[in-house]
Amino acid sequence: MLDEKIIEILKHEGPASFATYGPDGIHMAATWNSYIGIANSNLLLIPAGHLTKTQRNIEEGSQIQIIVASKDVPGLQGKGAGFLLKGKAHFEDKGENFERMKSRFDWIRAIMVFKVMEATELT
């Protein structure tokens, strides 16, 4: 699911913005591309220092959408590439994936494990 261009985007700094939906409507949050870990071909690991509203929305059944982009990666129409990633997520505060991310970011309280179910390159 994660093609080489998505992996290349995550190597370049830039914001990774994500949206969930809850009782208060759409909720937006963000992290940095460089903070996102890759667990396997469709799992991304996102460190959570806060993200409490995002977590609550996900625990109440919200799906999640994430946009990752970089102006330094060639896109469909020249310089700059981005993807809309859709999927489901859950939070973990222990285990192998958590410990891996905690070793990089000592400030995290949990990780958001995002399962990419659909990836669309943006034009």
Image (cartoon, helix red, strand yellow):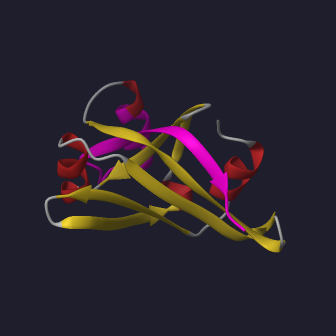
Tell me where residue 54 sits by quadrant. Answer: bottom left
Residue at 37% of width from left, 33% of height from top?
A: 99
Vertical position of residue 22 compared to residue 40: above or below: below
Is 55 left, or right, of 33 in this rendering? left
Magenta-colored stretch includes residue 50: no
Q: Which residues are magenta?
A: 98-123
In percent of width and height, residue 31 lies at 43, 63
Query: Camera-side residue: 17 or 23?
Result: 23
Whether residue 123 can be seen here: yes
Q: Position of residue 116 (x, y in %)?
A: 52, 39
Above or below for 13 versus 87: below
Name the residue rendered at 53%, 61% in the picture: 67
Horizontal placement of 33 versus 82: left or right? left
Confirm whether the magenta stretch covers residue 117: yes
Occupied quadrant, residue 61: top left
Give x and y (percent) for residue 110: 27, 43
11, above or below 40, in the image: below
Res. 50 in view: no
Residue sitting at the far right:
78
Q: Residue at x 31, y 37 (%)?
A: 90
Q: Is residue 75 left or right of residue 109?
A: right
**Residue that protrudes farthest toward the top in the picture:** 95
Q: Furthest-left residue in view?
A: 23
Quarter of the N terminus within the rendering:
top right
The x, y position of residue 86, in whole percent, is: 49, 47
